[in-house]
Structure formats: structure tokens, C-alpha cells
Image: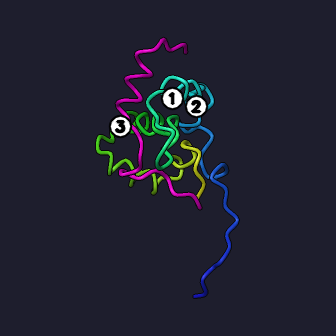
Amino acid sequence: MQTKWFYSFSLEERVPQDRLLRLVDKTIDLSFVRDLVKHTYSHTGAPSVDPVVVFKMALLGYLYGITSERRLAEEIRLNLAYMWFLGYDLDEQPPIASSPRPAPGTVCRLTASSSLKW
């Protein structure tokens, strides 16, 4: 069997339209998270993971009952819908458990303590 070198593949096409994550993505604008937590991010050192991605990771864990950060990181790498939801493509490396970022609970607490408008 010959190895394929190139594939024509789109996560956008592979994630079903009726998937819960599509509804969440379409309904809730999480861009406000960056402003809420910008004071907790350092401007020096290794670049951090986007706080919106951290929040979405915590949301994935909550929605799908994934309580382990390591297991969540593994599930994200394996699940195309999770990759799509976080804004990563197949050729991009999603955050791993040891990526420099605040703990997901920190971002969620800071976000929840603000006034959320749905």
C-alpha cells in the first residue's frame, strides 16, 4: 500500500451541523474573556495559550465530563469536533497539559465573577 502525501480535508466539513459545539460556537461570543483576564498574563517569557482557548477547554471538560486535564488534552487531539471548537486545524498542535497558561479554573472563576450577559 502506498502512503498518501496530501489530503483534501476540512474540519469545517467533518463536524456535523447539529453538533452541540456548533450551537455553542454560534450562540456565545467568548471574546470578552481576553479582556477579563489580561491582567493575569505576563508580557515576558514563553507565549501563553489564548485565554479563550483555555476557557473553551474548561467548557469542553464540563460539557463532556472530562475532569482530568491530561485526559482532556488527549481527547482534544483525538476528537475533530473539539479541535474545530478550539479553532485548531489538523496541522496545528492543540495545547497540552503542560502548556504555559493559567489553570482553567482560574479563567472560569474570573469570567464567572464578572457579569455575563447571555
> Residue sitting at 58 percent across and 50 percent down?
88
What is the CA distance from the residue labelled 3 to the residue labelled 2? Answer: 25 Å
Q: Main secondary structure of the magenta part?
A: loop
Residue 60 in the image, given as x and y percentages of width and height: 43, 38
For the residues bearing labels 2 and 1, Cβ distance under 8 angstroms: no
Quarter of the C terminus within the rendering: top right
From the image, tell me which residue sits under label 3.
103
Q: Which residues are magenta?
A: 91-118
Q: Residues within 10 Å of mark 1 (few under 14, many from 20)?
A: few
**Residue 74, disc:** none
Answer with left or right where residue 38 lies relative to residue 2: left
Question: Which amino acid is tagged 3?
Answer: Ala
For the residues bearing labels 3 and 1, Cβ distance under 8 angstroms: no
Question: Which amino acid is tagged 2?
Answer: Leu
Residue 105 in the image, given as x and y percentages of width and height: 34, 31
Q: Residues within 10 Å of mark 2 (few under 14, many from 20)?
A: few
Mark positioned earlier in the residue sequence (2 or 1): 2
Q: Secondary structure at mark 1?
A: helix
Q: Is residue 113 magenta?
A: yes
Q: What is the number of callouts on the image?
A: 3
From the image, tell me which residue sits under label 2.
23
As drawn, 56 above or below 9 = above
Quarter of the N terminus within the rendering: bottom right
As drawn, 35 above or below 61 = above
Residue 6 in the image, given as x and y percentages of width and height: 68, 73
Q: Nearer the viewer, mark 3 or mark 1?
A: 1
Question: Going by the picture, which residue comes out furthest to the front?
Answer: 44
From the image, tell me which residue sits under label 1.
38
Answer with left or right where residue 106 lies relative to residue 78: left
Task: Name the one closer to the observer, 69 or 106.
Answer: 106
